[in-house]
Image: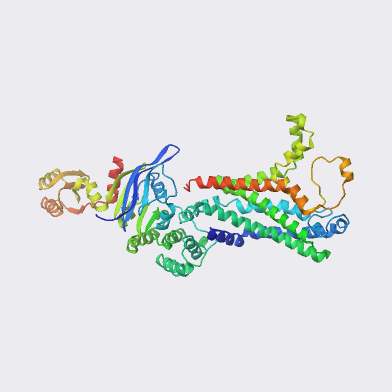
Amino acid sequence: MLTILRKELADYFTSMRCFILFLLVFIASAVAIYASYHGIREAAIDPGPVFIKLFTTGEDLPSLTVFIALLVPIIGIALGFDAINGERSSGTLNRILSQPIYRDSVINGKFLAGIVTLAIMIGAIILLVGGYGLRMIGVPPTAEEIVRIFIYFISAVIYGAFWMGLAILFSVIFRSLAVSLLFPMAIWILLGIPASIFNPYISFFVPAVSDSVSVQLMVARLSPYFLFEEAMTVLLIPVWRGWGLLTSVTTSSMLPNPLSLDQSLLIVWPQFTVLIALTAVCFAISYIVFMRQEIRST
Amino acid sequence: MGKKIVVKTEDLTKKYDRVTVVDHLNLQVAENEVFGLLGPNGAGKTTTILMLLGLTEPASGTAQIYGFDSTRQPLKVKRLAGYLPEKVGFYDTLTARENLRFIAELNNIGYAESEPLIEQVLKSVGLDDVGDKTVNKFSRGMKQRLGIADVLVKKPKVAFLDEPTAGLDPEGINQIIDLIANLPKMGTTVVFSSHRLYEVQRVCHSIGILAKGKMVVQGNLDELGRDALAKGRFRIEVETAEPSPQLVKVIKKIKGVSNVEAKGNVLHITTDADLRAEISKAVVQNGVALIQVKIEEFSLDDIYMKYFHEG
């Protein structure tokens, strides 16, 4: 499996696709730095640690977190959509499988290589913005901020792994590259639509619950996009308290001080678990389908 | 024979969506021979090979290579057997050498061992001068030869080549056939599928003909040939300037001639022995100008056509 992992990584890093993705990453970082350059002065007045605000502020421009939430699915899909059917159509799959290796090491190796590539890309964005931001504002991060950013990094990788798992799943099921690219893309767009759009439909079918905020939230949480955004918000904006209904009495008595790391983690734990579960499900299905699939190319 | 049987199937059956593709196939290949798997498209040749390699599970029956069950011990089988798929593909962005190195790594061949081996294998298929070119610049024939190099890198005991000559020009076919013919000397048994009879006839020691998933006939090429050709009889064609009914009668009287048929200027004569000398003498003595006398050698076509019509 290590051989396949190594080969896949070498493939990724020498491919045009990866070059373009890295270019995207750099552009995103540049824009994010520009955005935080403009927003950080005002944002620093608000309570909470300063350094971490580099990632979430951006006056009118989208901040880095917005970029990552947008970019990561694209990277994930781009890395995974031709994993299996690409090999199949180029005729290399049956050649590889006739070597003395277990069939699962092919798909495992590909998945791992994708995760490593994702981690390098996301790590590159975060470090680029962090590094330049540090030069820019001159406020070093505290240990807690570093941990928060690291956890955010991991959640972004898991989020990317979900999209890659989804793309790999379609690449196992469909023989055509175009289909396996379009399907995860369509799902991405569908899930990226704000859940509020669906509220009228919900109220049409089940009028009684339509006004309930918790129902709307539940619908929204079906989307990994929303889950990731929630996780990101809690992790990177320590003053964030969570969702659900808060009466004005509660909010007025709340102190606007940042939560400690373990409290933030506690809030975000369900989102985290669901993201991991979704990724695992995607991978497990593609794994099972691949293991049972016929190898014939024709 | 007394030769060791290294590839064996017993009642091997495969069904796709209730259509039986391979039907109770019994196949035996002896060590160090070239075995030709013949049959029209869709006869189940590829499926049989895939089952022998453990890449596809049979519905029933067993496939064995060197005594290892292909379904139960696929890794052991894959260590011994090399496979050249019908549509062989390589990683286009890698060089020929890198492609082979990857396969060597998958076979746990260390770097120290694999480098000279790759060199040697590339040389044997005549690709040593383009080994560092990326595969997307290769022609179809070069890819096919690289495919054979790819099989050889793992030093297989058995090589399964699925239509290795499909889509090649005559020169490419010759190169591949020569490579195949040399494999048994290197201790590799070859099973290759084809529907080009001429190639099979050139290199195969024994053949098996498949039709609709069933083995129609299997055995040594020479024996099958004699068998196929009019039950051991000889067929002689005599072309004359102007055959007369008189001549036909005379030839019929020659001892050993069992049948004479006139088609235009050509007489088709069936005999028990090679009677060319006697027949030409008779023609000349009857005052008819002799143009040519030809004895029909059996070809695989005859075998193929014969069993095909029966099957």
Q: Where does residue A103 sit, x and y in percent of width and height?
A: 50, 52
Q: Is residue B304 visible?
A: yes
- Residue B233: % across, % down: 18, 48
Residue B226 appears at what percent x and percent y? Answer: 22, 50
Can see residue B194?
no
Q: Nearer the viewer, residue A195 or A254?
A: A254
What count of labels does the image hold? 0
Q: Is residue B113 above or below residue A246?
A: below
Q: Residue at x 70, y 48 (%)?
A: A272
Kindly indicate the quadrant of the structure image that contains residue B175.
Answer: bottom left
Left or right: where B125 falls relative to A249? left
Residue A211 found in image quarter: top right
Q: Nearer the viewer, residue A255 or B77?
A: A255
Q: What scheme was used to colour the molecule?
A: rainbow
* B256 lies left or right of A56: left
**In-front residue for pair A56/B256:** A56
> In the shown orientation, is residue B75 left or right of residue A113?
left
Counting from the top left corner in percent of width and height, residue B223 is at 23, 51
Quarter of the figure with residue A289: top right
Q: Residue at x 28, y 40 (%)?
A: B310
